[in-house]
Image (spheres, rainbow, N blue to C red):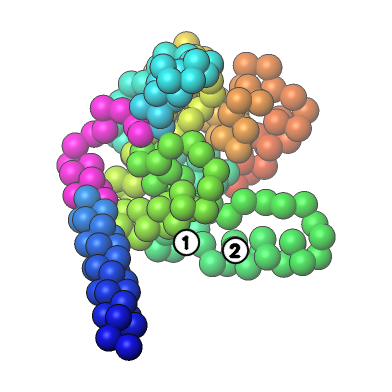
Amino acid sequence: MKDMVMKKKQQRSFSRWILKSLLKLFLLLACLSLFQVAVLKYIDPPFTINMVWERLRHELFDAPYVVPAYGWQNLSKISPHLKQAVIAAEDQRFLTHHGFDFAEIKIVFRNVLEGKSFRGASTITMQAARSVFLPATRNPLRKLAEAWYTVLIEVVWDKARILEIYLNTVDWGTGIVGAQAGARAYFAKDAAVLTREQAALMAAILPSPHKWSPIDPSPHLKKRQQRILAAMPAMPLL
């Protein structure tokens, strides 16, 4: 009888130790992620976690690798046309939501229930979170981390900083990171001087930057460009 009591006590003690350890780990990760977000409010990221991840995959598993072109441009030095085009294409309620566009999420759920084609509901904030802080993997933990970073970003950064970091770190094609690298690769010019048409084409490829190209746009891509051009005048300027 004593042995059974002792065993139960040991089990409860071990369970408490596990719970305390998990709580400590969660608090450590929460503090670390908050520190990361706070630092990037003031410091431009010299690289993204995904850039490191792709290099590690190459070194450890011999995965294909292209040295990324990456050049930071302050928001003021990025074409206003590109800012409007990206908001028009990716997140038209960018200034009014707090990281999650629940109106868009409702539409996605309704489309799924009605058997219509799937469309994403990622906001610019969510995309900035995964571009900067997370590797390009597909698993539930990554989605949870993306949601957590999205909350932190909306609390710590203002909308202009969110857009600035997004435009500079988003994947714009194979080995192309950010607006400046994209403008140089596709149009041989700086992001500051992109025209409306060029900006709309660059925004149009963002859902599939490794499949589509502004250099040789397909009829489908040209239709996307025209829809973006039509929506741009109503988009905010940051």
Query: Residue 9: horizontal and vertical position, in percent?
Result: 27, 80
Badge 1 element:
loop
Taking 114 as reference, is 72 above or below it? Answer: above
Q: Mark 2 and 1 residues: CB-CB less than 8 Å, in contact?
A: yes
Badge 2 element:
helix
Using residue 68 as the reference point, say whether residue 219 is left or right of it. right
Q: Residue placed farthest to the bottom in the image?
A: 1
Taking 86 as reference, is 79 above or below it? Answer: above
- Chain part drawn in magenta: 33-49
Using residue 231 as the reference point, say whether residue 235 is left or right of it. left
Residue at 74 percent of width and 61 percent of height: 112
Amino acid identity at mark 2: Ile
> In this view of the protein, which residue sits in the foreground, 222 or 59?
59
- Residue 134 magenta: no
Confirm whether residue 20 shows in the render. yes
Using residue 62 as the reference point, say whether residue 7 is left or right of it. left
> In this view of the protein, which residue sits in the foreground, 66 or 98?
66
Taking 44 as reference, is 61 above or below it? Answer: above
Using residue 34 as the reference point, say whether residue 149 is left or right of it. right
**Label 1 Cα crowd, 10 Å radius (few <14 / some 14-19 / many 20+):** many
In which quadrant of the rendered view does residue 215 lie? top right
- Residue 35 magenta: yes
The residues tagged by marks 2 and 1 sit, at their Cα atoms, a distance apart of 8 Å
Looking at the image, how many numbered discs can be counted on the residues? 2
In which quadrant of the rendered view does residue 189 lie? top left
Confirm whether residue 16 shows in the render. no
Q: Which mark is residue 105?
A: 2
Query: Residue 31: horizontal and vertical position, in percent?
Result: 20, 56
Residue at 35 percent of width and 34 percent of height: 49
Q: Which mark is residue 167?
A: none
User: Which residue is the site of mark 1?
Assistant: 100
